[in-house]
Image: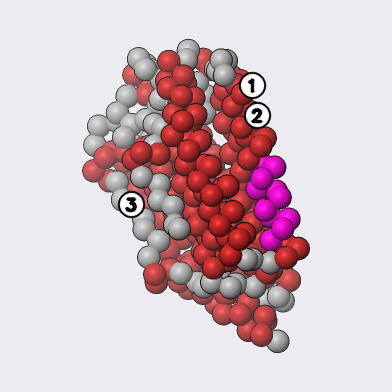
Amino acid sequence: MAYTFDKSLETGNAMIDSQHRQLIDAINSLMAACSQGKGRQEIDKIARFLEDYTAKHFGDEEKLQMQSRYPDYVNHKRYHETFKKVVHEISSELSQKGPSVALVSKVNTSIGGWLVNHITKEDVKVAAHLRTAKPAVSTLGARTPGAPAAAARTPGIGAARKSYTFTSDLATGNTMIDTQHKQLFTAINNLLDACSKGNGRQTIETTCHFLENYTTKHFGDEEKLQQQSHYPDYLNHKKYHDQFKKTVKEISMELSQKGPSILLVNKITTSVGNWLVSHIKQQDMKVVAHLQKSQKK
């Protein structure tokens, strides 16, 4: 079963919704890798990513709850701890025994089914609380009612909005790399969306910081694969990565200092979104072709 992040799962909090989309993508990738009989090494990587990202998401969400003094924080944290334990157990079982029909079913019900239920029953209550919390504590993505003029819609920015879609011509065939590329596209779209809708600067900064941090994580994982497989063009590829990270950091700082503008949205489109599409097609395809050859040896 593949899970889809639809309107019924939206909480209205930009950061929480973005991370939920990425969790659902990771769950779908794990189930697909298991059902398609992918190698245990690849399945292990996806399972570990899901485990690590679950911990990151819950940490971010719990920080929001503590800052806003969410009244049901203790119980909500217990749900998180139980789920992290389940994900860890499934990850360990996959690593030790490999995928099975029973284990894929467990991923479906105990991870995918649990997350959907948790979002619709618990996280929507958290997001509703954040919307009514005082502005001083609503710091990680919730739009604050009655925000000052700095958070108002910026005229004309919406016209520059572009959305990126992970299409079949961008699929490299490596599950981990493709999953992370999808998540980068989601982060880029969320940032463009936050700018074009004139969301508060705090929301935009949070979205941008997530893109910056996740870019670093993805490039680190990809470079590790290249080093392990002795990719011959590793040094040049790393230079592309370092330059892109520098660009994202500069945009993040400019957004933090000046807020969104038409020029900056265009810069995100050309220097971030378009760059990533071009990089996948021209460079990452060569990396994955090398990885596939290395695995056959």
Answer whether residue 219 is visible to the viewer in this image: no
Secondary structure under the numbered disc 2 in the rendered image:
helix
Q: Check the picture and name the quadrant holding the C terminus.
A: bottom right
Q: Is residue 146 left or right of residue 106?
A: left
Q: Position of residue 244 (x, y in %)?
A: 54, 56
Compared to residue 197, the image places residue 112 above or below, namely below
Name the residue tied to disc 2.
Answer: 78
Give the color scheme: rainbow, by chain, secondary structure or one colour.
secondary structure
Q: Secondary structure at mark 1?
A: helix
Q: What is the x, y in percent for residue 78?
A: 65, 29
Quarter of the figure with residue 57: top right
Would you say 271 lies left or right of 69 here?
left
Q: Residue at x 72, y 76 (%)?
A: 230
Q: In this view, which residue lies farthest toward the top?
A: 134
Residue 243 on the magenta segment: no
Looking at the image, is 68 positioned above or below residue 204?
above
Image point 66% across, 85% down: which residue? Answer: 296
Determine contact: label 3, label 1, CB under 8 Å: no
Q: Quadrant of residue 131?
A: top left
Given the image, on which type of amino acid does mark 2 rest? Arg
Q: Which residues are magenta?
A: 84-94
The residue under label 1 is which amino acid type? Val
